[in-house]
Amino acid sequence: MLDNFDAVAKLIEMNKQFRKIIKELVDNGFGVKQTQKGFRIAPPKSCMNQRVYFTHGGEACLHPIRRDFVKEYGYRINFKK
């Protein structure tokens, strides 16, 4: 899905912690697609809420992603990896 993920990450100067989060989400079945201004994150089919989540790759998105994924999808992101 994200074949050239590291190259894309360097191009948009993505936060290192955000890169880890994206890799964790992909490993757990979330669909991640790069858009012009950030990322489109689609939940797995097994999730009750199928609303797509859009975000940028900056440092300011870390807390909202953590908060929203617990609230919307019931998925707790592991920040300690």
Image: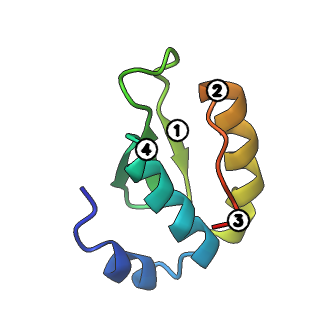
Residue on which disc 1 sits:
53
Q: Position of residue 25 (x, y in %)?
A: 47, 49
Q: Position of residue 67 (x, y in %)?
A: 76, 41
Query: Quick one: label 2 or label 1, which is nearer the N terminus?
Result: 1
User: Could you give the CA–CA distance between mark 3 and mark 1, rounded to whole angstroms?
Assistant: 22 Å
Residue on which disc 2 sits:
72
Q: Residue at x 37, y 56 (%)?
A: 35
Amino acid under disc 1: Tyr
Q: Residue at x 69, y 61 (%)?
A: 79
Q: Residue at x 47, y 78 (%)?
A: 12
Amino acid under disc 4: Asn
Q: Which mark is residue 80?
A: 3
Are dots 3 and 1 in contact, CB under 8 Å? Answer: no
Query: Quick one: label 3 or label 2, which is nearer the N terminus?
Result: 2
User: Could you give the CA–CA distance between mark 3 and mark 2, rounded to whole angstroms?
Assistant: 21 Å
Quadrant where the C terminus is found in the figure = bottom right
Q: Nearer the viewer, mark 4 or mark 1?
A: 4
Query: Quick one: label 2 or label 4, which is nearer the N terminus?
Result: 4
User: Could you give the CA–CA distance between mark 2 and mark 1, rounded to whole angstroms?
Assistant: 10 Å
How packed is label 4: few (under 14 Cα within 10 Å), some, or many (20 or more)? Answer: few
Q: Is residue 57 visible?
A: no
Residue on which disc 4 sits:
28
Are dots 2 and 1 in contact, CB under 8 Å? Answer: yes
Amino acid under disc 2: Glu
